[in-house]
Image: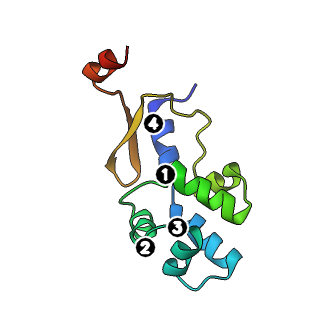
Amino acid sequence: MQTETQTNTNFFNYDPNNLLNFILEKLELKNDASLCRFLELKPHVISKIRNFHVMVSPYVLIRMHEKTGLSIGELRALMGDKRKKYMKGGERWVSTAPNDKVYAQPDAEKQAAVA
C-alpha cells in the first residue's frame, strides 16, 4: 500500500507535453494548431493541456487513440500517468496546483438526488 507522500510524488511525473510532442513527431505535424486540426479539437484545448490549465480528458485520450492507433495505456505512459487505480463513478479530480491532484466526493445533496 502506498503512503500519501508516495502517491503525491507520482503526480510530479505527470507531463502531458511529452505525449503531445511524441504525437507531433510521430505524425510529422508542424505545431499544436495542426495537431488540433488532426484530432478535430478546438485550438485552445491543446494550449490549455500544454500549460497545465486542464488535464488530458478521457475524450482527448480517446481521440488520440483513434487517430494515432496507440493504445490508451501507451498514451497514459507517455504523459507519465502511472496510476494503477481508476476513479469510480461519481468521483472527480480537483486540481489545487498544476501537478497536485486530490480526490473530491460529489456533494451529498447530489448523491441523495441520484439515489
- Residue lying at 59% horizontally and 74% vertically, measured from the top left: 38
Q: CA distance from mark 1 to mark 4?
A: 25 Å
Q: Residues within 10 Å of mark 4 (few under 14, many from 20)?
A: few
Measured as percent of width and height from the top left, residue 57 is found at: 49, 51
- Residue identifier under label 2: 43
Q: Which mark is residue 57?
A: 1
Choose mark 4 or mark 3, whichever is in front: 3
The three-letter code of the residue at mark 1 reads Ser
Q: Which mark is residue 13?
A: none
Measured as percent of width and height from the top left, residue 15 is found at: 51, 60
Q: Mark 4 or mark 3: name the one nearer the start of the chain.
A: 4
Measured as percent of width and height from the top left, residue 14 is found at: 51, 54
Q: Residues within 10 Å of mark 3 (few under 14, many from 20)?
A: some
Relative height, residue 17 to residue 1 (above, below): below
- Residue identifier under label 3: 17
Choose mark 2 or mark 3, whichever is in front: 2
In the foreground, 66 or 6? 66
- Residue identifier under label 4: 5
Measured as percent of width and height from the top left, residue 37 is found at: 54, 75
Query: Left of 75 or right of it: where is 5?
Result: left
Choose mark 1 or mark 4, whichever is in front: 1
The three-letter code of the residue at mark 3 reads Asn
